[in-house]
Image (cartoon, helix red, strand yellow):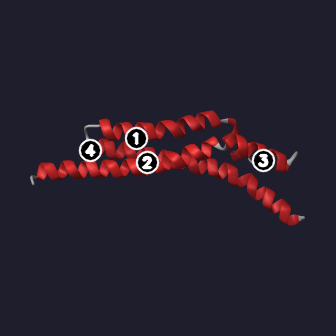
Amino acid sequence: MELEERVRQLDRGVRAIGVVVLLFAGLFSVRTAMQADEMENIFREMLGDKPLPLVSLITFQFQGEILAVALLAPLAGITAAFVGKSPRCALYTVAAAVLVSLSVGLFMFSGYYAPMKAIIMEMNAQ
């Protein structure tokens, strides 16, 4: 087998692995972003008149924009992986999309965790 053929196979394999990782990261971010309405209702009901933490207010206020980023980042990464001619550019784009997807998911998760922590602390105080 020629060196060029081996490099092409390696390039396709790395792109495929990157896409699989990106799909999992994208699923995490989209799933957490889609839960915002239900989580907001639960937190407002359980906390009553107490204000929500700032990170939670941001996640609930900008749910649509966050969901758009959660959907577009994996789409951009997958497109770059399959359409990009430069292996380096495709790899960097997929890695950036994974980073964005994980960041969005973790940001949304922290928005859900903050009020949950307040609810648990209130229950322990009683």
- In the image, taking residue 80 as reference, residue 35 lies left or right, namely right
- On the image, numbered disc 4 is attached to which residue? 87
Residue type beneath disc 3: Ile
Q: Position of residue 29 (x, y in %)?
A: 55, 46
How far apart are the two marked residues, 3 and 1, measured between alpha carbons? 34 Å
State which quadrant residue 104 falls in.
top right
Can residue 57 be seen from the camera position used here? no
Residue type beneath disc 1: Gly
* Mark closer to the chain start, 4 or 2: 2
Location of the N terminus by quadrant is bottom left
- On the image, numbered disc 1 is attached to which residue? 77
Q: Does the CB distance between marks 1 and 2 fall below 8 Å?
A: yes
Tell me the element at label 1: helix
Q: Does the CB distance between marks 1 and 4 fall below 8 Å?
A: no
| Disc number placed over residue 37 in the picture, else none | none
* Mark closer to the chain start, 3 or 1: 3
Q: Does the CB distance between marks 2 and 3 fall below 8 Å?
A: no
Tell me the element at label 2: helix
- On the image, numbered disc 2 is attached to which residue? 22
How far apart are the two marked residues, 1 and 2, measured between alpha carbons? 7 Å
Residue occupying the far right of the picture: 126
Tell me the element at label 3: helix
- On the image, numbered disc 3 is attached to which residue? 42
Please, is residue 83 above or below residue 27 in the view? above
The residue closer to the viewer here, 1 or 93, is 1
Q: Position of residue 108 (x, y in %)?
A: 62, 47
* Mark closer to the chain start, 2 or 3: 2
Residue at point 69%, 46% (across, down)? 55
How far apart are the two marked residues, 1 and 4, measured between alpha carbons? 13 Å
